[in-house]
Amino acid sequence: MSIEIVGKRYANALFQLGQEQHKLEQFEEELRIVREVFHSNKPLMEFLKHPRVELHKKKQLLKEAFQGFSNEVTHTLELILDRHREAIIPTMVSEFIHLNNEARGIAEAEVYSVRSLSKDEEETIQTVFAKKLQKDTLRIHNIVDPSILGGLKLKIGNRIYDGSVSGKLERIERELVSGNN
C-alpha cells in the first residue's frame, strides 16, 4: 500500500479521535511541531528507519522529543513505529492538518513575494482569496523569493496563482517561441 494511502488512514483515525474528544486544536498544534521537527532534522528519519536500532530506543527518542504531548498523538507515533511505517509520519501529519482545515473552513497558502508582506497586504490577500476559494479563512505563509522579480505567486493546495513578473515573462516567452501573437 502506498505511503499516501496509509498516512491518510492514520490521519483519519486521529482526526476522528480528536473530534470525539474535542481536541482537534491541540492535536494540530502538536502535529505542526512534529512536522517541523521532522522537516528540520533529516537524520531523525534515518534513525527511525534504521533496521539495527531497537524499537524501544526509537520509542524512547520520540517520547523524549515530544514530551508533554497528548497521549493520543504520542500513541499514534508509537503505533506507526510498531508497524515499521516511519516513512508515513510526514504524510499523516499533512493529511491531519488538511482534514482539520477542511472541517474549519480554512485554506493554507504559500505566498511568494520579493519582500516580506506587511500585515495590511496579508489581510488583503486573505480577504480576496478566502472569498475566491469559498473559505472562512486563509492562513498565509510568506516566502521571500527574489527570483520572482516582483508581484506575487500563491500556492493554495494544488492551485497556483502566478501574478509574478517572472511568471509573466515566461508566458510571453512561450507565446513568442510558439509563434502565437
Image: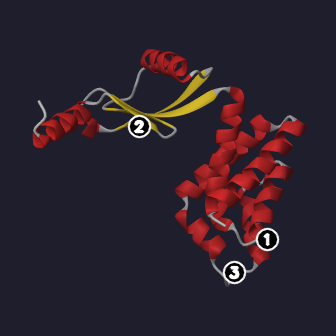
- For badge 2, the amino acid type reads Ile
- Residue drawn at x 63%, y 62% is 3
Where residue 88 appears, as percent x and y from the top left, is 65, 61
The residue at the point 52 percent across, 38 percent down is 157
Q: CA distance from mark 2 to mark 1?
A: 37 Å
| Category of crowding for the residue at label 3, using alpha-carbon neighbours closer than 10 angstroms: few (below 14), some (14–19), many (at least 20) | few
Q: Is residue 35 above or below residue 128?
A: below
Mark 2 highlights which residue? 143
Q: Position of residue 33 (x, y in %)?
A: 65, 47
- Res 58 label: none
Q: Is residue 57 positioned above or below 31 on the image?
A: below
Which quadrant would the N terminus be assigned to in this image?
bottom right
Q: Is residue 134 visible?
A: yes
Q: Where residue 53 is drawn, which disc sits there?
A: 3
Look at label 1 and name its amino acid: Asp
Q: CA distance from mark 1 to mark 3?
A: 13 Å
In the rendered structure, are the residues bearing label 2 and label 3 in contact, judged by CB atoms less than 8 Å apart?
no
The percent coordinates of residue 38 (x first, y second) are 59, 57
Residue 131 place in picture, x, y as percent: 54, 17
Question: Is 133 rendered above or below residue 79?
Answer: above
Q: Amino acid at mark 3?
A: Val
**Considering only order in the chain, which callout, 1 or 2, is on the residue closer to the N terminus?**
1
Mark earlier in primary sequence (1, 3): 3
Residue name at image x 72 percent, y 72 percent: 84
Nearer mark to the viewer, of 1 and 3: 1
Q: Seen from this angle, which residue lies furthest bottom?
A: 52
Task: Tell me the residue that label 1 is attached to.
Answer: 82
